[in-house]
Image (cartoon, coloured by chain):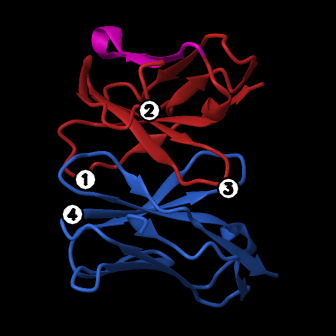
Chain colours: A blue, B red
Amino acid sequence: QKEVEQNSGPLSVPEGAIASLNCTYSDRGSQSFFWYRQYSGKSPELIMFIYSNGDKEDGRFTAQLNKASQYVSLLIRDSQPSDSATYLCAVTGGRRALTFGSGTRLQVQP
Amino acid sequence: EAGVTQFPSHSVIEKGQTVTLRCDPISGHDNLYWYRRVMGKEIKFLLHFVKESKQDESGMPNNRFLAERTGGTYSTLKVQPAELEDSGVYFCASSPNPGTDNEQFFGPGTRLTVL
């Protein structure tokens, strides 16, 4: 079992819709949770992080964390073609190193 | 503010040769990380520096890899001798300290191809 699991996709949504990206993790000791966006051939770019159960909103992005279910998600409202990218879920536990999932490719159709 | 920079952007070498990758973190960031993504796999942690000290090198694959951060500024990652399986994209990231949020900012990566 991978430590951080993501559906590889592609997840295809129409422009203006809500994109929902999901991630599960195996280590119950995980403390911090991050969503990175990576355009093809580019570096990962941090878009959200969350530590506490519940929701955290930043503009069109909402991160949701459920530690009991070991589940973290990212919602993107009013999806735009420019949101088309690979979204990486990452977690940290007692050490600062990030453990990444393999990423979900999002395609927003104009 | 300049971001994390890495050099070179691409490197093509033959098996058995040596390659040195360089990372310049964001100025003032004490934490520096190396990660690697091999084809078709997820990004994997290699090691973590706090200033010039190796805090965590549990991800280093073997003793062909040597990382240094003399003076606590830029870092180098040397692969000697390179093997085919070392091909991939090597990312460097940095974060401030004491940064409780542990927000890591990534560089553009070095794409290493070993032939």
Residue B114 in the image: above or below residue A41: above
Q: Position of residue B103 (x, y in %)?
A: 34, 49
Q: Residues within 10 Å of mark 3 (few under 14, many from 20)?
A: some
Q: Taking B23 as reference, is A33 left or right? A: left
Report the amino acid beneath label 2: Pro
Bounds of the magenta segment: B65-81
Give the Cα separation between the discs numbered 3 and 4: 26 Å
Residue at horizontal 43%, vertical 26%? B62
The circle on residue B101 is 1
- Please identify, in this view, whether the residue under mark 3 or under mark 4 is nearer the observer: 4
Viewer can see residue A57: yes
Q: Taking B99 as reference, is A102 left or right? A: right
Residue under disc 3 on the same chain as residue under disc 2: no
Q: Nearer the viewer, residue B113 or B30?
A: B113
Q: Nearer the viewer, residue B55 or A74?
A: B55
Report the amino acid beneath label 4: Gln
The circle on residue A39 is 3
Give the Cα separation between the discs numbered 2 and 1: 27 Å
